[in-house]
Image (tube, rainbow, N blue to C red):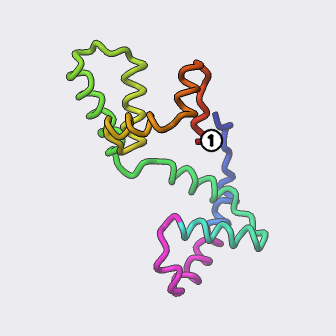
Amino acid sequence: MFGKQVINSDSLFDEQVLVKRHMSERFKEENWQNASLEQKWVKMFKEFEKKRIRVSNFQKLVEFIFCLPGTSEPVERIFSIMKSMWSESGSRMLEQNVKAVITWKIHTDWSCSDFYENLKLNNVFLKKVLSTEKYDWANK
């Protein structure tokens, strides 16, 4: 859980002026025009950091904005997957199993047979499952 983020509105205004000036100077550069929106923000914040220009309030605001989904499509996709699973199994599945399958479907594009074939080849994972130890997904 993140702590309470405090933004100083007076400093934010000053930082916004700096950011606007910086962006207008960079706008004419070809590598800037071809960069994605995310790349532009990263470049700008790195340049500010290199020059020791503090824009922490503005950076908090940008980070917050980028964490918001642009559309409701990801949520709708989850509900669609969940609806098809519940209707296919007639709600006989346990909630934890539905959650596991949805998580899998969201984070991979493997079919069930692809998953099975890859699982057979992953001896480390199979040994962990058989020994009932927790598998460290982050390092695999």
Residue 80 lies in the magenta stretch: no
Q: Position of residue 103 (x, y in %)?
A: 42, 33
Which SS does the magenta portion mostly show?
A: helix
Q: Is residue 33 above or below residue 137?
A: below
Count of number-bearing discs = 1
Image point 62% across, 71% down: which residue? Answer: 44
Residue 22 location, quadrant = bottom right
Q: Amino acid at mark 1?
A: Asn
**In the image: residue 121, left or right of residue 53:** left
Image point 41% across, 25% down: which residue? Answer: 99
Q: Position of residue 104 (x, y in %)?
A: 41, 35
Image point 54% across, 23% down: which residue? Answer: 129
Image point 55% across, 80% down: which residue? Answer: 24
Residue 39 location, quadrant = bottom right
Q: Is residue 21 above or below residue 13?
A: below
Front residue of this view, candidates 135 and 79: 135
Front residue of this view, candidates 97 and 47: 97
Front residue of this view, candidates 76 and 48: 76
Q: Position of residue 127 (x, y in %)?
A: 57, 26
Q: Is residue 71 above or below residue 10?
A: above
Residue span colored magenta: 17-38
Residue 34 lies in the magenta stretch: yes
Q: Which residue is mark 1?
A: 139
